[in-house]
Image: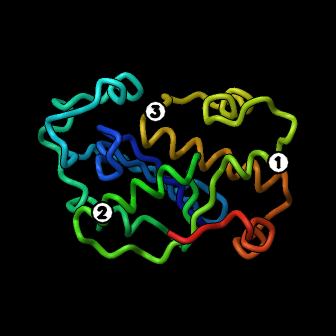
Amino acid sequence: MDFCAIDFETATHEKSSACEMGICVVQNSEIVETKTWLIKPPSFPYFSRFNIAVHGIHPEDVKDAPTFDEVWYEAQDLMYGSLMIAHNAGFDASVLRGCLEHYGMYTPKLNYLCSIQLAKKSWNYLPKYGLKPLAEYHKIDFTHHRAGADAEVCAKISLLAFEKLFLTSNDEVNEYMKAKIKKL
């Protein structure tokens, strides 16, 4: 299995307002690297109080941070293979698209999959499929709503799901989850 897990935290309701991005790289079913970037969003210095309450990132935390267009090339190099996984992938894919569009950047040809869909197929008896309940179920400790930690937990849960579903290659995942895999 080769994929990357991605997570964004945003400053506002705007899809281009990423203030933190985390990517966890999985090669041969092993986590090989997790990287996190604080990002100065286009709305700077404005941050929604609601968003701050969720992730705890304040404008002063990103005042000297690079903008998305300054970190994307490094991030894109980490996105190993062509499968991106995110927990609630519709949100993260829309933030990635929003940031790329805001800066007039090329959208890469990536397929993405939601780890919630994987979890529902793997553990269809659980009452909740949020990242925190799934992490608790699997006894994984992490700092919720921080992009690098969330991306890594997403990767760990995805690997556990693939194991439970007896999926051992990207081709098998593509075949088994084809109705759930979307294009960026």
Query: Which residue is denoted by mark 2 in the rendering?
Result: 72
Q: Residue at x 82, y 48 (%)?
A: 122
Residue 145 - label: 3
Q: CA distance from mark 3 to mark 2?
A: 20 Å
* Residue 4 percent coordinates (x, y): 53, 60
Name the secondary structure under disc 1. helix
Q: In front here: 139 or 58?
A: 58
Task: Tell whether 173 sits left or right of 28.
Answer: right
Name the secondary structure under disc 3. loop
Mark 1, Cα crowd under 10 Å, few <14 / some 14-19 / many 20+, is some
* Residue 165 percent coordinates (x, y): 85, 56
Query: Which residue is denoted by mark 1 in the rendering?
Result: 122
* Residue 30 percent coordinates (x, y): 62, 57
Task: Tell whether 25 sits left or right of 73.
Answer: right
Q: Residue at x 50, y 30 (%)?
A: 144
Of callouts 3 and 2, the N-terminal one: 2
Of callouts 1 and 3, the N-terminal one: 1
Report the amino acid beneath label 2. Answer: Trp
Name the secondary structure under disc 2. helix
Q: Is residue 167 above or below residue 135?
A: below
Q: Quadrant of the N terminus?
A: bottom right
Task: Tell whether 60 sits left or right of 113.
Answer: left
Q: Residue at x 73, y 76 (%)?
A: 171
Q: CA distance from mark 2 to mark 1?
A: 32 Å
* Residue 135 percent coordinates (x, y): 66, 32
